[in-house]
Image (spheres, grey):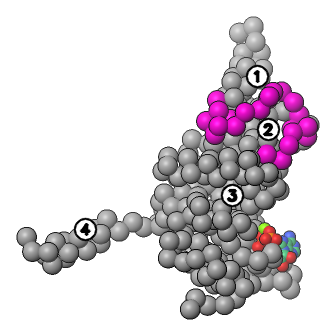
Amino acid sequence: MQDDERDILGVMDSMDTAVSPLLSLQDLRKSYGAIEAARGVSFDIFPNEVVAMVGDNGAGKSTIVKMLSGVVKPDGGQLFWQGKPFHPSGPDAVRDAGIETMFQDLALVNDVDAPGNLFMGQEPMKRWLGFLPILDRKKMRLETERLLDQIKIKLQSVDRPVRLMSGGQRQAIAIARILLSAKAQLMIMDEPTAALGIQEQAKVLNVIRNLHAQGLSILVISHNLEHVFSIANRIVVVQGGRIAASVATDEVSQQDVVQLIMGGRLQ
Ligand SMILES: Nc1ncnc2c1ncn2[C@@H]1O[C@H](COP(=O)(O)OP(=O)(O)OP(=O)(O)O)[C@@H](O)[C@H]1O
Ligand SMILES: [Mg+2]
């Protein structure tokens, strides 16, 4: 076979296997009073892709996350999940579909321990004396330890209320909680490393790499471009409630991305 024939077949091959987006955002809009936090946001997240969303404070990143997670209803625009129109009624519907979100403010319950936080609202029950339903604490504890082990994070004790834990430990619990969902195909993380020490940041980045290796897609928001460049396949730049750019990580420099965040263009 001639080289050019092989080239043509190669192109046809890649056309055949063209993947469709896992999640597609089309022209999403959201205003808070006079503030237009999202002014027509469109981008795609593909299967097994790590997309980093970057942009200045107030650019609209968390607003986008809240619309994707069903916490905030868009004023306009469309979502498509696995190619079908998606109008989630709220956070539970989004979770049921296979999208898990870790919010910027972690939303753990302070006075409850790690297993209690992990299983909140989905506690395993067992029967006491054969009939009385009670919490299966042992199962919760073992499962918590297994999940924390899976993301290679050790807590001295899982029995302490989370208010006594460090930021990194709390983060670990929030991550373990999203791992509990066997259905998850897309994980959304709003600044998962922002409040952490260097070692803990490295662990969270490894968790993201592990999830990616397991075939999941991840949308992660970060102000740390080194982190972004070490984990993301693609970078989406948000500016003034719009998507200013979507670039493959290996085709740009950190300087290019800084430029885009500040409203410039690539040279
Ligand atoms: N609940 C709200 N009520 C009123 N205005 C809001 C609300 N949430 C966000 N905003 C405004 O919408 C805009 C976008 O905010 P958003 O939180 O999405 O930004 P962000 O990109 O996540 O910023 P940061 O990097 O600081 O987290 C800002 O001007 C913000 O003040
Ligand atoms: Mg934010």
Where 233 sits versus 110, above or below? below
Of the two numbered discs 2 and 1 on the same chain, state the one appearing first in sequence: 2
Image x and y of residue 111, in percent: 92, 37
In the orientation shown, which residue stands out farthest toward the left? 1
- The residue type indicated by label 1 comes to Arg
Q: Which residue is mark 4?
A: 13
Q: Which residues are magenta?
A: 146-168
Depth check, mark 2 against mark 4: the one in front is: 4
Q: Which residue is mark 3?
A: 189
- The residue type indicated by label 4 comes to Asp
**Distance from Cα at disc 4 to Cα at disc 3:** 34 Å
Of the two numbered discs 3 and 2 on the same chain, state the one appearing first in sequence: 2
Secondary structure state at the residue bearing disc 1: helix
Magenta includes 202?
no
Quarter of the image with the C terminus is: bottom right
**Distance from Cα at disc 2 to Cα at disc 4:** 47 Å
Where 183 sits versus 194, above or below? above
Of the two numbered discs 4 and 1 on the same chain, state the one appearing first in sequence: 4
Of the two numbered discs 2 and 4 on the same chain, state the one appearing first in sequence: 4
- The residue type indicated by label 2 comes to Asn
Asked if disc 4 and disc 1 are in contact, CB closer than 8 Å, the reply is no
Packing grade of label 4 (10 A; few <14, some 14-19, many >=20) is few
Where 139 sits versus 167, above or below? above
Query: Is residue 130 visible from the viewing direction of this image?
Result: yes
**Distance from Cα at disc 2 to Cα at disc 1:** 12 Å
Q: Which residue is mark 2?
A: 117
Asked if disc 1 and disc 3 are in contact, CB closer than 8 Å, the reply is no
Image x and y of residue 17, in percent: 31, 65
Depth check, mark 3 against mark 2: the one in front is: 3
Image x and y of residue 108, in percent: 83, 45
Q: Is residue 215 left or right of residue 239?
A: left
